[in-house]
Structure formats: C-alpha cells, structure tokens
Image: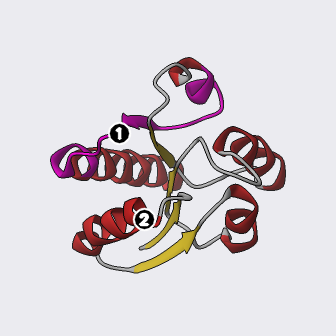
Amino acid sequence: MKFLIVDDDEVTRKYLKNVLKRFGGEIIEASNGAEALKKVDEDVDLILLDVIMPILDGITFLKVLKVLNKNPPPVIVVTIDDTRKEELKKLGVESVIIKPIFIEDIIKQIAQVMEERSNQNIQQHN
C-alpha cells in the first residue's frame, strides 16, 4: 500500500501520516499540488489531498492528474472549504472530509475507498 498526502500544513500532514500508519505501507508527502505531481506515480494507491494550497491548488492538481493519468488513484479530499463538494465529485474525488479531521472519520473513509477499489479490481479481473 502506498499513500500520498498533499497538504501545505505540516501539522495536518503529520496527523494524517500517523493515521495512515495503521494501514501499513509507504507514505509520501507533498506540500502543494506541483510537488505532488512530481511524486505521484503508478504505484500510489490513495491520495489524501487539501484544496487550498500555494503554487498549485488541489482543484488544479486534480485536473492535471486526470490528463496525465487515465486511471488515477482514488482521492480523498481533506479541506476546510465545504462549498466545492459537487465540483470535487465531478473531478472524480471519492470522498470529501471537512476539517477539523476526526480520526474515526478518516479511518472509515480510507477503509471504504480501499474496499471499493479492491472490489472494482476483482470485477475487472473476472
């Protein structure tokens, strides 16, 4: 399992990293969308993404990711901006979690997204 955390706030990244350690695997961090585009690759299983960031925001990151990768990894957005849920869903975001982040919510969402993705992979191979 390989995770990519994209958030300009170091405290949030550390918090999410501690949550993701429960799932095992490798955790990569980026402080903005431009840095994340350099780090995302075929092996990333899940992206946790903030929307409001300097240099390249989360919305622009999602648009570029869709162009560069026809089958991007699932994305869970973690943000304070609750006004863009519909726009994010149209961009293929699996789930939107509004800050403050509660550990139970993030664990539940990650587990759900990973289970759905696993079920899709099983169906594709049958």
Q: Give the range drawn in magenta.
A: 87-106
Q: Is residue 103 magenta?
A: yes
Please say if 98 is above or below 111.
above
Residue positioned 22% across, 71% down in the render = 22
In percent of the image, x 83 and y 47: which residue is there?
A: 67
The foreground one among 33 and 47 is: 33
As helix, strand or loop, the secondary structure at mark 1 comes to: loop
Q: Mark 2 is on which residue type?
A: Arg
Badge 2 element: helix
Q: Where is residue 64 in the image (x, y as percent from the top left)?
A: 80, 48
Q: Residues within 10 Å of mark 2 (few under 14, many from 20)?
A: many
Residue displayed at 68% across by 73% down: 39
CA distance separating discs 1 and 2? 13 Å
Question: In this figure, which residue is indicated by the disc labeled 2?
Answer: 13
Q: State which tag comes first along the sequence, 1 or 2.
A: 2
Mark 1 neighbour density, 10 Å: few (under 14) some (14–19) many (20 or more): some
Q: What residue type is labelled 1?
A: Lys
At 56% from the left and 22% from the top, the residue drawn is 84
The verdict on residue 17 being magenta is no
Residue underneath mark 1: 99
- Left of 79 or right of it: where is 17? left
115 or 97, nearer to the observer: 97
